[in-house]
Image: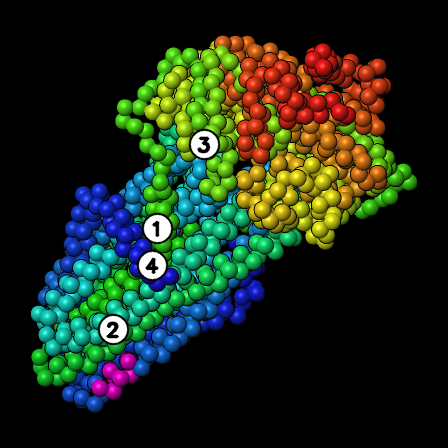
Amino acid sequence: MKKNKAKASPGTFRKVMSRVRSHWPLLLISILCAAANVFLTLAIPVVNGNAIDYLIGEGRVDLTAVLETLTTVLVCAGLAAAAQWLMNICNNRMTFEIVQEMRNDAMRKIESLPLSYLDSHPHGDIVSRVITDVDQFADGLLMGFTQLFSGILTILGTLGVMFSVNWQTALLVVAITPLSLFVASFIAKHTFDMFKLQSETRGEQTAFMEEMIGNREVIKAFSFEKKALEQFDEINERVKNYSLRATFFSSLTNPGTRFVNNLVYAAVALTGALSALRGRLSVGQLTAFLSYANQYTKPFNEISGVITEFQNALACAERIFELIEAEPQTPEPKDAFVLKGTHGSVEADNVWFSYTPDQKLIEDFSINVKPGQRVAIVGPTGCGKTTIINLLMRFYDVKAGSIKVDGHDIRTVTRQSLRSNYGMVLQETWLKNATIRENLCMGKPDASEEEMIAAAKAAHAHSFIRRLPQGYDTIITESGSGLSQGQKQLLCIARVMLCLPPMLILDEATSSIDTRTEILIQNAFAQMMEGRTSFIVAHRLSTIQSADIILVMREGHITEQGNHEQLLAKNGFYAEIYNAQFSE
Amino acid sequence: MKKIFSFLKQYRKEAILGPLFKLLEASFELLVPLVVADIIDVGIANGNRNIIIRDALIMAALGLIGMLFSITAQYFSAKAAVGLAATVRHELFNHIQNLSYSRSQTIGTATLLTRITNDVNQVQTGLNLALRLLLRSPFIVFGAMIMAFTVNVRAALIFVITIPLLAVVIFGIMKITTPLYRKVQSKLDRLLGLTRQNLTGVRVIRAFNNEAKELSDFESGNEALTQMQQHVGRISALMNPLTYVIVNGATAGLIYYGALRVNIGELTQGQVVAMVNYMSQILVELIKFANLIVTISKAIASADRIQDILEIETGMEMIPPEKTSDDRCLEFDHVHLTYPDAGAEALTDIHFSVGHGQSLGIIGGTGSGKSSVVNLIPRFFDATSGTVRIDGQDVRSYKPEALRKKIGLVPQKATLFKGTIRSNLLMADPEADETTMWEALRIAQAEDFVRGKEGGLDAEVAQEGRNFSGGQRQRLTIARALTRKPEILVLDDSASALDYMTDANLRRSIRQADSNMTVIIVSQRTASVRFADQIIVLDDGKICGLGNHDELMENCPVYREIYDSQFRKETAGKEEFREKE
């Protein structure tokens, strides 16, 4: 684990710094302000010390001089405050801009990740990276900016002044310093691992909660609440333990370094007072010295605090960078062809495909679909029909062989143009959290009101949309706004109706729609399919029968291929399924 | 806040000991300026080396004791904060699970998730800091003031003016920023929603080439969040500079007043230095305090949001049981249902009953209210008026668990949970044995593919069952419902992803299974309900036909229409098929 950390951390740190670097003007202003602030803050104790030196005793105080000196103090304090405010603002801006960029990068990456990545990573974990981890990272970064520069500058400045006033005492201070640093780095080293464990377990917990809360109706139906709570508590207990360790270890830094500070303070008081005895130091200078000893060591406190916070931030950053740097889908070749005016011929040549190397699925599959033909994909439930869709839409790439549209290998075509040539209605109805209008216009954002309504009418969605309180402006929420599964499906169909691409993919599209509506829709579909190449994962007999090519699938493999008559004649698996349909 | 504080009770010891040790540490810190004054006024003034050395050693000793106390304090604070966070997460999760389905539906999964993750984390950080510093800072501030009084009462009056001034600045800024942090959080919630949506809808988004649009939506949400964060940041950034100016002004005043008093022999130089030191301790503490306030106000905002969720009543009122003589298995007694925030009734005057071991088919068009009827049975929603009875007893008089134990629900959306096939089946009945599970799988037509899986019952199920196809998931959810050997099996359009062959086999094997099980089948296909003892035809939330297949064919036009549309298709196919034969 140690090794792991040693490798990961500096890389992450470098990446964070390169993001910081792109904001150099703000960084520069921030550093300048920090310098001004530190300079003035350091000057104030000296000036105060001077004033105190005037307070020699009864009747011997030069009040005018005291007043003059104190005016200087006030001016310095005012300027120091202004500089600090400006610095804070710069740091704020820098941090939040960096964080904004990281979130945008993360989202951009999500949009370009291969489906295989998204299918295999729990969504809750990805969400937790984009939201929680980034948030924690921002906290750490902001604290770093605010306290790191001024901390370092304060240390350097204080040392300078102390050496110029009394080098012996200054030397003593420097001699004790490494102790403070040692304590801080010792603790920091041990907390990083804890923070990482804490982050990981939190991610696991988020994924669990997403599953349980997202599907609470099932949980309820089976009274699984108690069991779920037990499982939750098990993870919760681990989060608690890691959290306790991370929090406690990181909070050791402060007492540890403060102890060292107090030693420094005592040492300064001792040597300073002894010097004063010998007349080498005035009382005012001693006061200044002591307040320096405080100021000098305080940044160590802060810096060590920053370091622990930063460890946490880096642990989070690492998780974010993992996502941002995940291997994106194969990039498109520079001269990728833009499919336009597609006729819709689809050809698969000796295609091999599997999700995992050890489980072969599609083996040496070839098909030649002419423009306007209908391909029905049939087979028992769970035979892997969705795999075909994954390949056609290029959600997944073939392992060997090729798929061609209009003679172009789809890997040489832009994904955008490939997908815009397909209209897809999936079995699981997904609508985004937006108005019905926005949902319908997903495929054609510039559609006119008339076009949209025409599409909704064609999908028989217009009448129920119109009856909704806000009509087309009804916002579809996560829970669906009281729309039934079937209504959602009608919206998904209307969505495709609006853009009408030359090729269609229909995945059990009509499964949640009642037969009466279905007939109407099938008429519309028939119209839509006219002259369009279509791939239909269907169970309806009429659709299957009228298909030009039927692909029969079983356990992920394509077992038979041909039209209805040919397949029946073959008296194989297709015939078996066909016969079973009417055996009530 | 209140409720969350009450959870702290079980960590009372830690929550008291943490601040206590912190205060002890602070007390030692307050002694330091007095020791310094002693060095100046006694050691240096009298040229006494021994006193200087002794005082320096005292300071080192104070430092050591301070550290030990402080470490103890950190431990107790961390334990209390982390423990409270774990308790709150537990309570929240439990509460969310106990919320009635209709209540949690209106809140939304995304919001619930942020509450239980981000907000609880904020509370943890806030409490940890609060236990360590919230008492310590004011203690040092007032302690320094009191110590100043012991030095010189009139000079100490400067402290009396300064401290309220500082309080005004700190609490003023806090008051302005707290509601703003709330806004920041709600913007963050929106971003979380967008992120989730992009993951769940990735196929559709890509199919419609909407990646850029989604990205720009996200970016504009992100931009709004950033703007808000910066706005709050600018205001809270005022805190440190303002307090700094005030404290330095006060120090200058102190030195000037000191100068006047020293001049008339009322104060010594060492005493003025001690006062100045107390003033600078106040500054150090205030800077910490200001940072603390930011964290705590975020934590309070989070705690309030958590409280809001915890205060939502579960919405599951119980009524006393009142057994009616009629013990039909399931009975709807003039039931009406209006969903929260909906204008019109979803169900109007639904009235029917089913006997034990009978089967009921529910058929109707999209949006006709089939799912609403189903939702009323396990009490996902409560009827607006009328009564739903199971075994002659109002569903509202059952303990939810007892009620749901009777029901095996197969929801429209086939959902599996991360774990194994076994763990998913055991959800329905933790006691079920191997034979029961295989029997359930057999009836659900899932036996073959489960046997084919490596590990069989112990084959892994990914989150949401993503490693199974839609149809496999559906059959597994049916098997899950059967595993509990329910009195009532409810199939809510659960065969939609099954092909005809599997669907037919499934129905046959359910019919042949346990004869005491009441079966309710909701479907679009007449074939699925055709052999039910009783069929309800729903249209626009009303029952427009009730009877068996033959009766309905006779007198329910809507049913006949549905049947004809399917039957025609099927006969067409059949005839063609016969021809070929």
Quarter of the image with the C terminus of chain A is top right
Write down the residue under mark 4: A5
| Residue B171: x %, y % from top left | 38, 53
Write down the residue under mark 3: A352
| Whether residue A576 can be seen here | yes
Q: Please determine if labels 2 and 1 lie on a single subunit.
A: yes
Quarter of the image with the N terminus of chain A is bottom left
Contact between marks 1 and 3 (CB within 8 A): the answer is no
Q: CA distance from mark 4 to mark 2?
A: 24 Å
- Give whichever of discs 2 and 3 has the lower sequence position: 2
Residue A179, label in figure: 2
- Give whichever of discs 4 and 3 has the lower sequence position: 4
Judge from the rendering whether residue B534 lies leftward or rightward of residue B88; answer left or right.
Answer: right
SS for tag 3?
strand
Which residue is at 53% across, 15% downward? A374
Write down the residue under mark 1: A318
Please give the range of residues in magenta: B53-60
Q: CA distance from mark 2 to mark 3?
A: 64 Å
What crowding class fits label 3: few (fewer than 14 Cα within 10 Å), some (14-19), or many (20 or more)? Answer: some
Q: How many marks do you count on the picture? A: 4
Q: CA distance from mark 1 to mark 3?
A: 36 Å
What crowding class fits label 2: few (fewer than 14 Cα within 10 Å), some (14-19), or many (20 or more)? Answer: some
Amino acid at circle 3: Trp
Residue A147, label in figure: none
* Up-down relation of residue B334 to residue A167 (above or below): above
| Residue B516: x %, y % from top left | 84, 40
What crowding class fits label 1: few (fewer than 14 Cα within 10 Å), some (14-19), or many (20 or more)? Answer: many
Q: CA distance from mark 4 to mark 3?
A: 40 Å
SS for tag 4?
helix
What crowding class fits label 4: few (fewer than 14 Cα within 10 Å), some (14-19), or many (20 or more)? Answer: some
Q: Chain of mark 4?
A: A
| Residue B452: x %, y % from top left | 62, 42
